[in-house]
Image: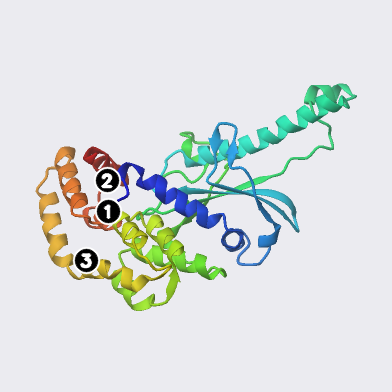
Amino acid sequence: MIQKENSFGTFDQEINTFFKDTHHFASLINTCLYQGQEIVKPENLMRVDPKIQAYTRDVLMLWNGRYGSYYLGIENQLIENYPMPYRILQYDCLVYKDQMDILEKEHRKKKDLRSSEEFLSGIKASDRLIPCITIVIYYGTRPWQTNFSMKDMFDVKDVEHLNEYKMNLIEVHSDTHQYKDKELDLVFSITRDILNGNFVIIKEKYKQSIPKQVALVIASMAKDEELYQQIKEEEKEVIVMCESLDRMREEASNKGFIKGKIQGKTEGIQIGKEDGVLMILKNLLKKGISDSYILEITGVSSELLIKAKQSLN
């Protein structure tokens, strides 16, 4: 069994491995940044060490393409992170700092700085940095509600002159992009339906066989430990998702009874009585009900659900 305290880490690893495939990565970038045009070619992508200074990116690639060289990064978010614009700014700046450190070290080694401006700068006027672009992929069941840029994190009236530094954000639960990479398109579309509780649609629509590893990525994006374990224990290397999701269809058919029962309990708890809500959440988790379904029928925050999961350990 997947240990609950390690499940999010396991999910991250599955998702990161999926996007380290250059075809998946290129399709994501082309769709989200270049309106589906095949600008980024898989053969022009090179995986690089994601550890920059003391921080480790989820996925980082070096793209040498038609527009020059770029660092392209992906950051996965299973729950909303309020300072995310700052975190992305920090990660990107560390990529630039790392390049600056290398340039300065090379010039000190070569001793080729001549003018006072070069000595002051530590680099030459002709030196250039490789830009960094980061995409945040959010797998929550609710819309991202807070900060989308650095401007959103300030409490001032005049924001016109502030650098915005807006996130490149993909919300899988509402993503309507069509990706040319078939596996990527399938992963996002099935995950979207799971996050939105469209279990009957999944049963009717997704009858094709897919690689087991891709199915594990879907379960990871949906944060569904039971589905993940069910797929993990399959002996076959191909999975028919509609069959693996029979449990969800049964769960959906019983929604009326379960939902009414749960809502009756939650409505009986006075607002602000967090202990009572935690007790209900823990009982649901013990019954093996998925995170996405719990969030849908109870309306609690992802943070409170995580707190309930932690208290089980």
Mark 2 and mark 1 residues within 8 Å of each other at the beta carbon: yes
Dot 3, how many residues are within 10 Å of its Cα: few (below 14), some (14-19), or many (20+)? some
**Mark positioned earlier in the residue sequence (2 or 1):** 1
Q: Please tell me the numbered disc located at residue 283.
A: none
Tag 2, which secondary structure?
A: helix
Tag 1, which secondary structure?
A: helix
Q: Looking at the picture, how far across and down is residue 297, in whole percent? A: 22, 57
Rendered residue at 45%/61% (across/down): 213
Type of amino acid at the residue the image marks with label 1:
Leu
Is residue 50 visible in this depiction of the protein?
yes
Kindly identify which residue carries mark 1: 295
Kindly identify which residue carries mark 3: 251
Q: Looking at the picture, how far across and down is residue 158, in whole percent? A: 53, 36
Tag 3, which secondary structure?
A: helix
Type of amino acid at the residue the image marks with label 2:
Leu
Q: Looking at the picture, how far across and down is residue 63, in whole percent? A: 69, 53
Rendered residue at 53%/70% (across/down): 182
Dot 1, how many residues are within 10 Å of its Cα: few (below 14), some (14-19), or many (20+)? some
Q: Looking at the picture, how far across and down is residue 245, in whole percent? A: 31, 68
Label 2, label 1: how far apart the Cα atoms are: 8 Å
**Mark positioned earlier in the residue sequence (1 or 3):** 3
Q: Please tell me the numbered disc located at residue 305.
A: 2
Label 3, label 2: how far apart the Cα atoms are: 19 Å
**Taking 273 as reference, is 224 above or below it?**
below
Mark 1 and mark 3 residues within 8 Å of each other at the beta carbon: no
Q: Nearer the viewer, mark 3 or mark 2?
A: 3
Rendered residue at 24%/39% (across/down): 313
Question: Front-most of 297 and 107?
Answer: 107
Identify the coloring. Answer: rainbow
